[in-house]
Image: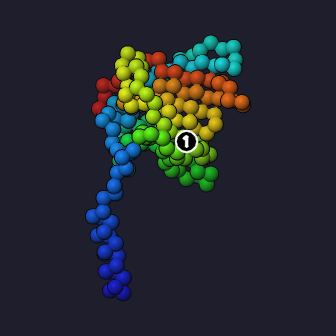
Amino acid sequence: MPKLYSLILLVFLFGACHTPKELPEQASPKASFVPKQKGTVWTYRYTFHNQEKEPIEQKLELLQTEQKADGLYLDLNQAKWLLRNDTLFVRCQGRGGGEFQAPLYLPTADSSTYNTCKGDVFMQVSAKRLPPKEILGKRYEDRFSYQIGPYERVEYALGLGVTLHQYFGIGQKLETQMELIDFQLGVGED
């Protein structure tokens, strides 16, 4: 029995002293991956390509943040996210009723593939870097593209958020497009 206690103590000490190595493609970025100030508002224009509907505008607002041991929880008027280091996680609902986190957007040096969820369905994401671009009058150097399954494509700018979200239908025909048309950084605490 004393040997078992010694072994447990060694494992505990090794785990406490060991710091995981950070991969270069996941190194912490200069700017926050997503703005964290309460009151931040993103305004999007939705264009419907498969229907004769006028485009509509919709606002996404950061209502509340809460720092916990596993990261910063961001509650928006239409989503709930977790920001951990440089990765944005989405809350997923398991078919058995449990809740868990899955990576939604993460920066990448070149390209990578990972899994995320939509509701209780897992989907493969192919991520890659995009060239710098001026968006809403400001140049963004760190931009990424995420192909989520066969029917969604997202463009993301570090420090700004989602700038373009496209939904495709059968035959890869563009159905709906959500484009960032205005951004107001909140003045609340971050």
Q: Quadrant of residue 6?
A: bottom left
Front residue (pair 21, 35): 21
Q: Residue at x 38, y 15 (%)?
A: 137
Q: Quadrant of residue 110?
A: top left
Q: Is residue 70 visible?
A: yes
Quarter of the image with the N terminus is bottom left
Q: How many marks do you count on the picture?
A: 1
Q: What type is the residue that disc 1 sits on?
A: Val
User: Residue 175's x, y, as percent?
Assistant: 66, 24
Q: Is residue 91 left or right of residue 47?
A: left
User: Residue 4's x, y, as percent?
Assistant: 36, 82
Q: Residue at x 50, y 39 (%)?
A: 127
User: Residue 115's x, y, as percent?
Assistant: 54, 47
Quarter of the image with the C terminus is top left
User: Residue 27's x, y, as percent?
Assistant: 34, 44
Q: Is residue 40 visible?
A: no
Q: Residue at x 34, y 35 (%)?
A: 32
**Above or below, 105 relative to 166:** below
Secondary structure at numbered mark 1: strand
Q: Which residue is mark 1?
A: 125
**Above or below, 65 relative to 6:** above
